Amino acid sequence: MGVAGVIFDVLLALALTWLAWQATRAADLFHAVVSFIVFGLLMALAWVRLEAPDIALAEAAIGAGATGALLLSALDRLASRERRRRLLYEPGAAWGFWIPAGGALLGALTLAAWKLPAPGLGNEVRAALGVSGVEHPVTAVLLNFRALDTLLEIGVLLLAAITIWSLGRAPSPLIPAMPSPALPALGRLLFPVFVLVAAYLLWRGSHAPGGAFPAGAVLGAGAILMLLAGARPWIRSSERGPWRWILSLGLVMLLAAGIAGTLAGQAFFEYPPGTAGPLILLLEVAAGLSIALLLFALYLRGEPCEHGYRGKGR
Amino acid sequence: MTAAQWIGGLLVLAGIPFLLLGTLGLLRFPDVYTRLHALAKSDNVGLGLVCIGLGVQSGSLTLLLKLVLIWVLMLIASATAAGLIARTALARGLRPWGT
């Protein structure tokens, strides 16, 4: 790595620290949210520099994209006087408590990172890659060696969506009145591209960075764009559509894959010999669809109303 | 260095002033409309030159087409975003500078 690389990394680290400070401390909440979105984008760049493109994809799509849209829409619901942050603690407490506590945590984390076994489990993963059914180590870990973690992650996402939806119906109107004709045109033009990119990422997951999480996030972001462009959300209970199944498809399929092994007398999540490849692809498709719809459901913040979903003023 | 690398390098170098001037406009222009004017035009030219330059430098047609695709998508997104920001600003009663 040359001098330019070091300079770039130092600038990136400084910018990340500054943006994190802005996102947590800016009095104006809009300023804080924009800082957070830029933080997510630069964080994705940091993951690229650490040669972890899988995490970079997920960070850019979920951390900056979906979460950013969620925060902006939450901000839109606040009255303008609530958009200023109230200081919840004494400014002096920063020096008395938060800075020492943060320093101690940073020190403990540094020590923990220092004490990690040096080569990690990379060699073990690489050695077992031949029997995993896929050629990309990250996908092998996510959907084969540690599929239980993925199962729990999707479970958490589903639980979050159910909890938010149980709090009440989506606020009405869903989208602010927008007189621009450009946004619907953009939505119509770009949604096929979103679908294409999601399918590409899903297919790529078996041999290169990609997979269910980035693909689902891209598809979910496309759905959010369509919603903002005035499209009518089709997930509502009165229609009893297949969306409930799609929401839980990822969890159901992962659970089935895990339990099927146990029933056949194997270990939990032990795939039958020779079927790992197709099985992982199937699980990826199911998980990707679920993640896309779950992120969209999180963005909706509840079941959309039948009437008054757009253009009723603010 | 091959001719493709020279041409690519020159295209990237030609793109950088556009990006710099666009950022300068964002920082120095007086109101949201003039800032959008600076960003939405200058940055897109700069990005296009950088993308085409990197694509030419890579020597691979596939990579060049992918980078051009990124540029086209950015053009569409930035034009729409600039229009939305300007319309929202106008709807909230922000007067253009000098009127």
Image (cartoon, coloured by chain):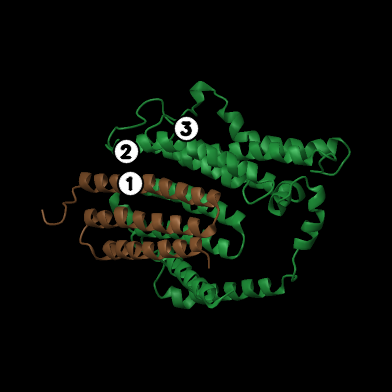
Chain colours: A green, B brown
Which residue shows up at 54% across the image and 58% down it?
A: B58
**Alpha carbon distance from label 2 to label 1:** 9 Å
Residue sitting nearer the eye, A314 or A183: A183
Write down the chain letter for disc 1. B
Cβ–Cβ under 8 Å for marks 2 and 1: yes
Residue A167 visible at all: no
Q: Amino acid at mark 1?
A: Ala
Q: Compared with residue A59, is residue A200 higher up or lower down, i.e. above or below?
A: above
The image's mark for residue A303 is 3
Q: Are marks 1 and 3 on the same chain?
A: no
**Alpha carbon distance from label 2 to label 3:** 27 Å
Residue sitting nearer the eye, A89 or A222: A222
Q: Position of residue A72 (x, y in %)?
A: 39, 49
Which residue shows up at 27% across the image and 54% down it?
A: B36
Badge 2: residue crowd in 10 Å (few <14, some 14–19, many ≥20): some
Write down the chain letter for disc 2. A
Q: Compared with residue A99, is residue A198 higher up or lower down, i.e. above or below?
A: above
